[in-house]
Structures are given as structure tokens and as C-alpha cells.
Amino acid sequence: MKRKIRMGMVGGGPGAFIGGVHRMTARLDGKIELVCGAFSSDPAKSKSMAEELFLPAKRCYDSYDIMFEAESRLPPGDRMDFVSIVTPNVRHFDIAMKALDHGFHVVCDKPMTFDFSQAQCLHKKVMESGLLFCVTYNYTAYPMVKQAKAMVAGGVLGELRKIIAEYSLGWLAAPNAGKQATWRVDPLQAGSTACMGDIGTHSENLIRYVTGLEIEALCSDLSTFVKGRTLDDDGSVMLRFKGGAKGLIHASEVYTGEENRLSLKVCGSKGSIVWNQETPDELTVKTNDAPMQVLRRGWAGTFPELGKFTRIPAGHPEGFLEAFANIYNEFATAVDARLRNATYQADFPTVDDGLHGMLFLKRVIESNQSASKWTPFAL
């Protein structure tokens, strides 16, 4: 790389959690610099955020419309290369479409859009533009998740039979869970689902990434336990995959006492593997004819290319931020390749994953509302 890749941001103003995560992780490997932003729909809050980030006043904009227009008029050596969208779901589509219209690559938080029809339109736009588009399904970027993917692809587990993903949180167990919870349970901002859109989609994406299996049909049961809410705060989804494997997703944001319990179990005819996000450097491998084995990041027996996704030696834990940074690192490398008219086979979630995630949510809602329950997945 001859220079850093320049990032703009929409959203992530004062008090926002995920905006800070994006900013921290984008700069972790030194390839990306934040050069501009429209951090809030309130210009005063946006300016306050820009001052906190030491950005020049002229690169802090009152709206993303103004930002895209102004940045596109700057010389190529000064303007931003891509925008990171970290707003509530309802705004993702319009921001992304306008960024693409102005020729900017896009990183977008998940779920990709407000509804499936928007996702289809946005997918078509990205395909036509040829621009890079990343959806931050960050859990696929953990090194030992990539180890699991390599083992499945290499046939170590044999024919896949059962896949179980659990994602349990307790942060929405009380009616008033704070600012970050407010928009996530608001159908006008989050869309038709809360829990499934927030964490269930992560579970499905993790299953698809590791196993490569395609869903044939699903059966969902969504619940709203906290009185006064209109969207789900808990749910379970049974899955039937093409080829005969079966699966289950359990997602809950009212599981009192749980912090961030995301786990994946993959069982095949030869063996099984277990990965837990709260102990992310470990992957447990089990068979019927040998002692249980625990593979650890950085040690013998792991996939050789994992070194690309690790920064420090074994025994020094890497976690959520580093996995998030792996996505930004891959995206920056892909943008740099475009600038040099080179090719690079990047490993990050794309607009295809975003579209698939929105189809999953559409089918989950349809199944939950259906009397027959089992719902075909494909279009």
C-alpha cells in the first residue's frame, strides 16, 4: 500500500456503541484513517463527535447527502475511498444507495437493510456498480472459525448431520435497557424483527460460512417476553439443509445473566467441532475413537493461512475487536487492490451475504406467522 485507505462514517455519534467499535477496529492495523463523517442527524452532535475525533471542521458534515456531494468533488488524492454505515437499520438502504451513486465503496453494519425488497434493490445496485460492499458479520472473521471452515471443507468431520448455533444475551431482560436498546425494539427503526435481526442473523451467517450448507426450509417460533414490546426478544429456528443435514438456531436477548454467549456445534459422520465466542482462541474436536482434542490459535494442527488473521502469539487472547478488525483489514486490502488495478481474493462478508441474511429474516417472519410452520427457503 502506498497510502492509507480513507474512510468516512455515517452515524456513530455521541453515545453510540457500534460506531466506536467500527472506528477502533478500522484503524487497528494502520491501513485505514477516518477523514470525514456525518455522525448524527443533529448537526451539533455531529460536530461534537468530530471534535472528539480531532477531525477538521470542514470534513464534518450536517448530513450524509452533503458529505457525499462534497467528498465526490474533492480531488482523488483527498476524498474518502469508502463509507462506513453505522446507523439504525431503517437508514442503511438510502445511505448505501447514495454512496454507490457517488462512486464510493461501502461497509455496512448488519442487517443490511430494513426489509428484503430493499436488499434486492441494493444487491442489484452493487452488482451494476462494480464497487466493493461489505456487511459486518464479524464473527466469521475469528481465526478459529476459519479453522472450523477449513476442517469442514477438508472433510475432517465427514458428512454433516447436525448444526446447532446458540446466541444468548441478557441485556434486554428488563423493559428499559438504555439508549442502544431503544431503536432495536422499535419496528419503525429496526424492521420486522428485533432479536432475530440483531443476533439470529449472525448465527445463520456463521452456520453458512463454516458449513457451506444451503437452507432448504425452516420453522421458526418467535417470542416477545417483555411486556410493551412489539418485536421479538427471543426465538428458535429449526433448519433443514439441502443434502439432508438438520440444524437449530436458538437466539435470545432476554436470557438473564448471559453476556455474549455465541456458540457453534457442527456434527458429522466422522467427528464434531465446538466453538464458543467467549473463548474464541479454542476449537474443540471430538470423535468416537480418540480423546477429545482442543486446538488453539497459533499452535500446530491449525490451518496454515490463519496467520493472516492473527496479530499476537498464542496465549495472548484475541477477541471481538480483532475479529472485527480482520474484516476491515481485508476490505482495505481489497480497496487498495482496486486503486492499483490489481486483483485480490478478499475474505469478508459481501452484499451476497447481506441479501441472504435478509431472506433468512423474511422466511423466519413468514414461518412464525404461518399455520403450517415449515417454510421453503428459496425464492
Image: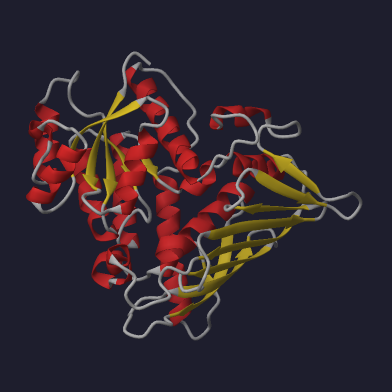
340 up-or-down from 201: above or below: above
Residue at the top extreme? 2
Quarter of image, res 66: top left
Q: Nearer the viewer, residue 314 or 84?
A: 314
How far across and how far down the image is residue 200, in percent?
A: 48, 63
How far across and how far down the image is residue 267, in percent?
A: 74, 57
Quarter of image, res 7: top left
Q: Nearer the viewer, residue 160 or 11?
A: 11
Q: Which residue is painted at 66% across and 32% down in the image?
A: 298
8 up-or-down from 32: above or below: below
Q: Which residue is painted at 34% across and 50% down in the image?
A: 18
Q: Is residue 379 visible?
A: no
Q: Is residue 56 visible?
A: yes
Q: Nearer the viewer, residue 337 or 120?
A: 337
**Which image quarter is the C terminus in?**
bottom left
128 up-or-down from 287: above or below: above
**Which image quarter is the N terminus in?**
top left
Q: Which residue is painted at 34% across and 78% down in the image?
A: 175
Quarter of image, res 282: top right
Q: Which residue is painted at 53% across and 44% down in the image?
A: 319
How far across and how far down the image is residue 219, in percent?
A: 55, 74
